[in-house]
Image: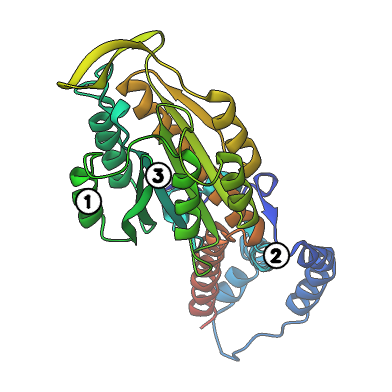
Amino acid sequence: MLNNWNINIFEFEFLQANYLYLLFLLPFIAWLLWKIEKNRKGDWKFTSSIANQQKLAETKIHWLRQVLIGLKLLIVALAIIALAKPFRWNDRDASTNDYKYGIDIVLALDVSLSMLATDFQPNRLEAAKEVAKEFIDGRRGDRIGLVVYAGEAYTACPATLDYEVLKTQIDQVDGMNIEGGTAIGTGLGTAVVHLRSDSLKSKVIILLTDGSNNAGDITPIQAADLAKTKNICVYTIGVGSNGMAPTPMVTPVGIRYENQLVEIDEATLNEIAEITGGQYFRATDKESLDEIYEEIERLEKRKMIDKYFQSEPPPTPGAFLNWIFAVLSIVIIVEFSLFIVND
């Protein structure tokens, strides 16, 4: 609320600063207003008593007219500053975050058998799905899609603004009806292809896995290079606790859980992120996975703020216009009061 009246010029930057050179005209405008005031002969001729005429010649009336000149100069100065389109970086609140740059996001989710490991509760896959839905709930106006992969990959949900449909699809995905293995390159490549040329300017893939690439016809690095050519930023997340974890294994008598060493190809995930301008994260539990998604959201919001202000910082001359209106109102009231006295 106070910002609506804060006209501390040293806190502002200006989009059209050249207008500020007009402030050098203020001495000339002051001289011109003083000259006009000095040569005024009055607007009305009237007959009045000597006492009233003496009243009009009182010093306080003279000084009041000088104050009016000062107020008029202030109005001119404020108008010039408003023309220069002032803005402050600190004014980027929720009202200015309605950017014209949206984000297309694809979640590439590993649904291989190892994602059923129970070092996350109830398992890695369900924890990843829950956190992904929480992330979706925090988005506004971004198109989000879902690609799932194991030994192969497919698009479970095209990029959409219907987040309820998307979350329903996330609930339904599993690795039961997909070829086994972990084809990180294929999953990433499918996500890249999904972000078509008509996607929004900001394109992001969040790729989550708990292992290393052991299937597919395209390597993770090849897929990362493809993403780079399409200006797609890839954030990679390695999921799994440190050390050993109860992991499902296929045996002749079915699936059984055995303690297995958690092996994530962090070097490759790091390289994917570096190639595409993203970042690699390691989640060792659900809480850290929550924090990773929050950090990705902050990083993308920061990018959007930077892009928004670099292309078109929003001018905020409101405080100067408020003071123009307030001072102009005072001038009108005082001028009218003098007119009544003169009359």
Name of the residue lying farthest toward the front? 252
Q: Residue at x 58, y 37 (%)?
A: 273
Q: Residue at x 50, y 50 (%)?
A: 189
Of the residues shown, which amino acid type is indicated by label 3?
Answer: Ala
Secondary-structure class at tag 2 = loop
Badge 2, how many Cα within 10 Å: few under 14, some, many 20+? many
Alpha carbon distance from label 2 to label 1? 51 Å
Nearer-the-camera pick, 71 or 258: 258
- Residue at which label 2 appears: 84
**Tag 1 or tag 3, which sits nearer the N-term?**
3
- Asked if the residue at tag 1 contacts the one at tag 2, i.e. Cβ–Cβ closer than 8 Å, the answer is no
Of the residues shown, which amino acid type is indicated by label 1?
Answer: Gln
Nearer-the-camera pick, 137 or 256: 256
| Count of numbered circles in the view | 3
Secondary-structure class at tag 3 = strand
Residue 220 percent coordinates (x, y):
55, 40
Alpha carbon distance from label 2 to label 3? 47 Å
Residue 59 at least partly seen: no
Q: Residue at x 54, y 31 (%)?
A: 269
- Residue at which label 1 appears: 169
Residue 331 at least partly seen: yes
- Residue at which label 3 appears: 108
Relative side of 115 to 208, left or right: left
